[in-house]
Image (cartoon, coloured by chain):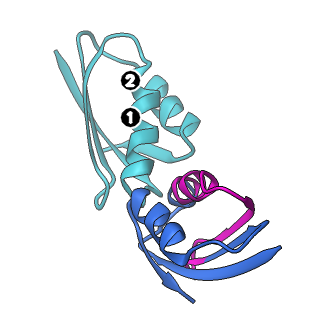
Chain colours: A cyan, B blue
């Protein structure tokens, strides 16, 4: 298991978190996703290491910007 | 055509507005819905007068509170 943290900017509510969750969940190997809206903290757990670019791309797909934390 | 304004509290983003729109659109006779997230202004146009309680109930169904404006 690999766990990586990212900081997502622009999320304001649970719907925003839901959009991010939906996109990140599409990535191969993701087993758990935790999102804290106030801080923008996104924690992704996966069965194998995930390319950060893939996670950042998924967050962008949801309409937000992210960076490794 | 009847147009009525309401003030919705708690919407923070376009997803929130979308949720309110979806619920209000289910009401019989609604022909147009306009939502301004920053001010919370919800404008509902309908082919016949709508009971305010129905609109307020729809907004509540979406997870927000509203009052006639």
The region drawn magenta spans B18-41
Q: Residue at x 77, y 77 (%)?
A: B2
Q: Is residue A1 toward the left or the right of residue A68 in the image?
A: left
Residue name at image x 52 percent, y 62 percent: B13
Q: Position of residue A52 (x, y in %)?
A: 41, 27
Quarter occupied by the C terminus of chain B: bottom right
Question: Is residue B31 within the magenta segment?
Answer: yes
Q: Measuring from the top left, give residue B25's x and y in whole percent.
A: 64, 54
Tell me: residue A17, above or below residue B50: above
Q: Secondary structure at mark 2?
A: helix
Residue A22 relative to residue B14: left or right: left
From what the image shows, is residue B5 above or below residue B58? below
Do the residues bearing badges 2 and 1 touch, measured as CB atoms within 8 Å? yes
| Image-quadrant location for residue B60 | bottom left
Quadrant where the N terminus of chain B is found in the figure: bottom right
Residue underneath mark 2: A25
Looking at the image, which residue is at 43% across and 55% down? Answer: A11
Query: In this rendering, is residue B13 above or below B44?
Result: above
Q: Chain of mark 2?
A: A
Please check whether the numbered discs 2 and 1 fall on a single chain.
Answer: yes
Q: In the picture shown, does residue A35 fall above or below B54?
A: above
For the point 44% across and 66% down, the residue is B57
User: Where does label 1 land, which residue?
Assistant: A21
Whether the magenta-drawn stretch holds residue B10 is answered as: no
């Amino acid at each position: 298991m690999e766990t990586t943290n990212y900081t997502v900017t622009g999320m304001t509510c649970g719907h925003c978190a839901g959009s991010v969750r939906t996109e990140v969940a599409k990535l191969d190997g993701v087993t758990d996703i935790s999102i804290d809206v106030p801080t923008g903290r996104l924690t992704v757990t996966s069965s194998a290491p995930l390319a950060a670019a893939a996670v950042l791309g998924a967050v962008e797909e949801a309409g937000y910007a992210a960076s490794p934390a």
